Amino acid sequence: MERDRFLQSIAQRLGRESTTEVPVRKLSGVSSRYIDHPFGIETISRAQWPVYFKDQIESIGGSALIADSLSEAAALISDILKPLDGVNIVTWSKDEFVDWNINWLWEEKGSVEYVSNDLIDSSTDLTTIIRSAKVGITTASFAVVNTGTIVLNTNQFRNRSVSLLPALHLVLVRESQLVARLGDAFPTDHSEAIPSSIHFITGPSRSADIENDLSIGVHGPAAVTVIICKGI
Amino acid sequence: MSLQTDSSSKPKKSTLKQRADDALSDDFLRAAVAFTTDRLRSRKAESTDKLGDWQEWRDRGSQIRSHTISHLDYYLRQFAEKMEENGGHVHFAADAAEAQAIVLQITAEVNAKLVVKSKSMVSEEIHINHILEDAGVNCIETDLGEWIIQLAHETPSHIIIPAIHKNRHQIQKLFELEGGETLSPETKVLAGYARRKLRERFEQADIGMTGCNFAIAESGTTVMFSNEGNARMVTTLPKTHIVMMGMERIIPAWNDLEVMANLLPRSATGQNMTVYMTALSGPRRPHELDGPDNVHVIILDNGRSDALGDPEFQEVLNCIRCGACLNVCPVYRQVGGHAYGAVYPGPIGAVINPILQRGTKEAGELAYASSLCGACTEACPVKIPLHDMLVHLRRRYVDNGHAPAVEKAAFTAFGSICSSPTLFSAATRTGRWMQLNVLGSDAGRRSQTAPLMKIANSFEPLKGWTSYRALPPAPSKSFRDQWSDLSNTDSDSVHRKHDKNGT
């Protein structure tokens, strides 16, 4: 049905003409009380955020490790990957990880950065990642503390598949990227183009569709591990 | 294959009563429905208690939804324009037939052989799976529960957990039949099989089809909540993405999404957040490696606008499809979703199906599958007065002349008896005689020993009552007869008696 006619008939049912005038709103979004108290009855100081995030994500089957420095973070990454020697690792663009000092990930571990490059036949690459990658490593735009959610905004350097197709998703987060509540991670400037996709991920893939019995990793990653680096 | 699917999985032609009887005699179903609804309900209570101020959240949710619906044309236009700026295509469909035609046109354009779907109630509403199969396009549900019932040629029995009526052995058989492999009934094995098989399909598919929980007008964004990750799969790998969207799914702004994201997962499953909340704004941008090249949003009316401007029903469009009303409904709890015989089960289904099915007699009958206890209204995160709507629906059902002839005759008789004192008093005495002789005398219990019980049990409309229920016997003296005695008592003596008792 033609758009104007469709919208016109809606307006008619509502008893008025179709309008392009911005509607007046009495209220929108969450309450100021929630903005002031995003942890409900609990008061959680900023210093406690990393641990609170860890508790949240662990309560839903994910895991989080807190590092005091970048070198400690690199050591944690190495520890996680050690028992997985020989599996295919895919990552976002190397540029996303510049100050994490983990060049060995590509140079020694043979990880593959999966980015836009006109010289690479991307469809072949995609097939490889679908079929064989076991670990996907990304950074994040934000991590939401009160729900244990990581937020990924995609662009040409940060694709969708790395956080989705491998069985283990490893996420590197800086302490400064922690925000209290979901709304703090939403895009605010709508004059700029919004990312084509924004993913809010809270723990590993789950389903209770077989007799209410929980199964983990039905389609998405079965393991989500977040490394939070303090002080950056 | 398409023929088989077609004939077996469309809702069966049967009456509400037959379907309810079927459900009541299925012990596994009843146990599974009771277990699932209990669990979802207690988890909801736990997560809303922890959040605090739940009533205030509901208020905000209700106000945001009501505001949006009363300016629906404005926000839909804004959404469509923004989605087009983002590079997506927006289609408006007045009814199921138009929506089907648009989908078929898109599948023809991209020469699609395989469509992978993530859960979408709107797509069930327009029977798109059958339409695609008939057009020679393979169409696969990828939500684990939806895939199970697709393989079984059945329909969902719960909006959130569609296959609660299937046990693991049935699921094992369905999977073995599908893949020709021998499996075991362990959850891990069955889920692993689904992961492996559906992975291949995601990779092969030409089109990914999803529903849409919310559409944000200010940025032209569609938002999906999911737990398994299949919604992400079907919007990452296939080249074309079709979004099926009921026209009321809109919200004005991102900050409103935060309210909905606090209401929806808690009300649906008691999760603080679903595993995935995916916000998509058009196709992939230049140099992005994955995501669809083409995004089509199909916005469907299909009877929804009949509720607009109707003071009794407009609020039903506030619904965010959480299923909380199912989990608290004493009727749903006993019979599960199939008994409703329509796409949407439970209290919300009883209200919304008549709108989608344009007031047909079958759909209207669902308003009677309720005890009007109001638990649904209490549970609704956006405060839709569902049980009031069920009463309005019953009135309309009668106004439309759908009430059974026996009921009409009974109420006509009731009317004339009650307007004549002589007839009324004669009727109460006859009633007592009838109850003793026809229904039996043992108070509160069903008796098959009353002389005329057999007769009562074989006649409608008496049968509907006497087969399942019994009333305590009527007292030998009716209230009206007692009243005349009471009026003759000295009122002073009554008062004195009371004083004595009080001191």
Image: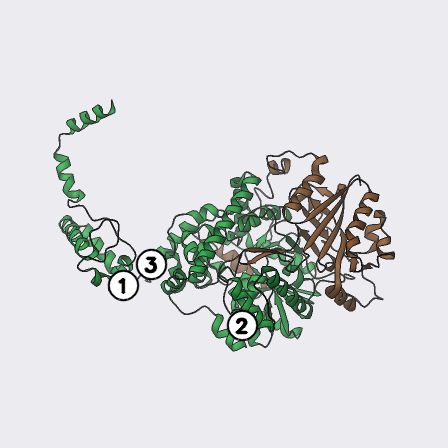
Label 2 environment density (alpha carbons within 10 Å; few <14, some 14–19, many ≥20): many
> Which residue is rendered at x = 51% and y = 62% of the image?
B167
Q: Position of residue B185 (x, y in %)?
A: 56, 63
- The CA span between labels 3 and 2 is 35 Å
> Which residue is rendered at x = 26% and y = 51% of the image?
B445
Q: Which mark is residue B130?
A: 2
Q: Position of residue B402 (x, y in %)?
A: 33, 62
* Residue type at tag 1: Ala
When asked about the image quadrant of residue B289, the answer is bottom right
Above or below — where is A176 with respect to B165? above
Q: Which mark is residue B405?
A: 1
Q: Which residue is mark 3?
A: B399
Instruction: Identify the secondary structure beneath mark 3.
Output: helix
Mark 3 or 2, which is nearer the eye?
Answer: 2
Q: Nearer the viewer, residue B122 or A39?
A: A39
Q: Position of residue A227 (x, y in %)?
A: 75, 46
- Tell me if I can see residue A190 in this picture: no
For chain A, the rendered hue is brown
In the visual, does B34 lie left or right of B499? right
In the visual, does A232 lie left or right of B155? right
- Give the chain of mark 3: B
